[in-house]
């Protein structure tokens, strides 16, 4: 409810500001610099909110698991940017070894290139969710039609491959704009970001990545790692493979249980 109130407040304030600016210019043309400045500041605010992945101001956003899941001592491991033909199979083997279920936010184009790998993710008990069709770096600059095309294409691709319709969406780099939420609503998707991330596409030191994740290791946490675009250690090993064993052991010690986002959504 608070997410909806925040979004509604921001959008209403934006509409009112634009109307006031337009009215001011019509009635007193000399005020146009002030009107333009007000509108520009409003757009900067909206852009800043869109650059904050964990913001709730542009619509509902899973930054933590629901309260019921947290009460059950559940946490979610989410893995982005795959499937990757080298890293993903190794990640899956590790997850099998520790009996951990994860949520894989897959890129549609990559899934189409490696459909068997994408199907294997689901076969092993994990969930495949929507991470856009092409993972465009300028995703947050797309208009409503462009966003709808990206999400719908990924929905179609991933559903056709796995037989399972994605229920969650994560924006590329977590960046978005006010056009995203209406598209998500129309497609029946929930936006999910994270409560702790390891920055394992940029940091090649497993200890630093572990530190960032373990600092946020608590009931209800949504943790973010990557199988696609994974950084490598000095020995050439994908960082995610070095981090997972310690992360799983620490969660077990804390009495936490890994679930997929779908499982956490269940009452």
Image (cartoon, helix red, strand yellow):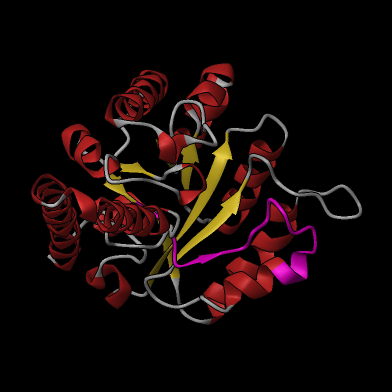
Residue furthest bottom as drawn: 254
Q: Nearer the viewer, residue 39 or 185?
A: 39
Q: Residue at x 74, y 59 (%)?
A: 203
Residue 260 image position (x, y, % from top left):
39, 53
Q: Main secondary structure of the magenta part?
A: loop
Q: Residue at x 65, y 33 (%)?
A: 84
- In the rendered image, the vertical position of residue 231 relative to residue 77, given as above or below: above
Say which quarter of the image contains residue 147.
top left
Q: Residue at x 66, y 75 (%)?
A: 211
Residue 227 image position (x, y, % from top left):
63, 43
Q: Residue at x 26, y 66 (%)?
A: 66
50 left or right of 253 in image: left
Residue 130 image position (x, y, % from top left):
39, 36
155 left or right of 251 in image: left
Residue 144 image position (x, y, % from top left):
28, 30
Quadrant of the image containing the N terminus? bottom left
210 left or right of 18 in image: right
- In the rendered image, the vertical position of residue 146 relative to residue 91, given as above or below: above
Q: What range is drawn magenta here?
A: 192-208
Q: Nearer the viewer, residue 22 or 239?
A: 22
Q: Nearer the viewer, residue 13 or 30?
A: 30
Q: Nearer the viewer, residue 55 or 40?
A: 40
């Amino acid at each position: 409810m608070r997410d909806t109130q925040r979004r509604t407040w921001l959008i209403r304030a934006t509409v009112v500001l634009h109307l006031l600016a337009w009215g001011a210019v019509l009635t007193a043309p000399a005020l146009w610099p002030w009107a333009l400045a007000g509108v520009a500041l409003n757009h900067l605010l909206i852009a800043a909110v869109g650059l904050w992945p964990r913001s709730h101001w542009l619509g509902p956003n899973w930054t933590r698991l629901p309260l019921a899941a947290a009460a059950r001592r559940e946490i979610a491991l989410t893995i982005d940017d795959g499937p990757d033909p080298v890293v993903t199979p190794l990640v899956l083997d590790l997850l099998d070894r520790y009996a951990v279920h994860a949520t894989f936010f897959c890129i549609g184009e990559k899934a189409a290139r490696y459909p068997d790998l994408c199907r294997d993710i689901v076969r092993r008990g994990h969930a495949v969710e929507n991470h856009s069709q092409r993972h465009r770096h300028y995703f947050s600059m797309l208009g409503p039609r462009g966003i709808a095309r990206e999400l719908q294409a990924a929905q179609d691709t991933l559903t056709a491959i796995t037989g399972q319709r994605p229920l969650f969406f994560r924006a590329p780099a977590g960046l978005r704009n006010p056009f995203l939420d209406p598209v998500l609503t129309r497609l029946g998707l929930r936006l999910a970001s994270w409560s702790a991330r390891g920055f394992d596409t940029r940091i090649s030191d497993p200890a630093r990545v572990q530190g960032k994740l373990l600092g946020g290791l608590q009931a209800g946490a949504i943790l973010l790692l990557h199988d696609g675009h994974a950084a490598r250690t000095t020995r050439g090993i994908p960082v995610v493979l070095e981090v997972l064993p310690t992360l799983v052991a620490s969660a077990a010690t804390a009495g936490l249980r890994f679930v997929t986002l779908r499982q956490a959504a269940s009452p």
